[in-house]
Image (cartoon, rainbow, N blue to C red):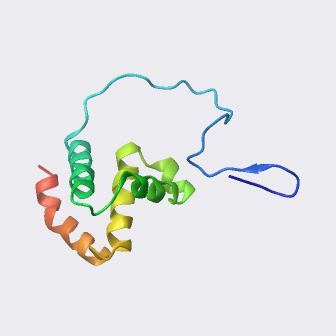
């Protein structure tokens, strides 16, 4: 969070404290979709193997472009951040991720 010359606060898209919004907060519990469960498991596996930390995940989520952040759901943000971190750390390339996604597309469509 920074302030400009007039004292106005420039907040990042994830910093929601005191943002005016009259939409109700959905507090309903829901079952996670299979892909959300797998995303959670992937993050736990990668952090357990020392490939990334929760702090790095948060940093990568907070670095998302505001429009992408707003359009993405909770676990979509996790996936975006995990991909960015794997590329940043040289574990995978974007091309490798895209190839693997293409290879798994038929399985995802079932």
Is residue 19 left or right of 95 when viewed as pictured?
Answer: right
Q: Nearer the viewer, residue 5 or 56?
A: 56
The residue depicted at 48 percent of the width and 49 percent of the height is: 71
Residue 51 placement (x, y as % from top left)? 28, 63
Image height of 21 relative to 85, above or below: above
Residue 82 placement (x, y as % from top left)? 34, 60
Is residue 20 left or right of 83 when viewed as pictured?
Answer: right
Image height of 55 relative to 74, above or below: below
Is residue 77 left or right of 41 when viewed as pictured?
Answer: right
**Quadrant of the rendered structure where residue 22 is?**
top right
Q: How many marks?
A: 0
Q: Nearer the viewer, residue 96 or 11?
A: 11
Residue 83 placement (x, y as % from top left)? 33, 64
**Quadrant of the rendered structure where residue 79 is?**
bottom left
Residue 29 placement (x, y as % from top left)? 33, 24
Image height of 23 relative to 40, above or below: above
The residue depicted at 43 percent of the width and 23 percent of the height is: 27
Q: Which residue is situated farthest in the right direction here?
A: 6
The residue depicted at 60 percent of the width and 39 percent of the height is: 16
Image height of 110 relative to 31, above or below: below
């Amino acid at each position: 969070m920074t302030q400009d010359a007039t004292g106005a606060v420039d907040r990042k898209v994830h910093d929601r404290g005191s943002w005016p919004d009259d939409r109700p907060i959905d507090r309903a519990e829901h079952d996670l979709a299979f892909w959300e469960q797998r995303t959670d498991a992937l993050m736990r596996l990668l952090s357990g193997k020392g490939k990334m930390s929760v702090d790095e995940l948060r940093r990568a989520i907070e670095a998302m472009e505001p429009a992408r952040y707003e359009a993405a759901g909770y676990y979509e943000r996790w996936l975006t951040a995990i991909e960015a971190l794997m590329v940043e750390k040289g574990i995978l390339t974007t091309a490798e991720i895209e190839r693997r996604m293409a290879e798994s597309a038929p399985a995802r469509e079932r």
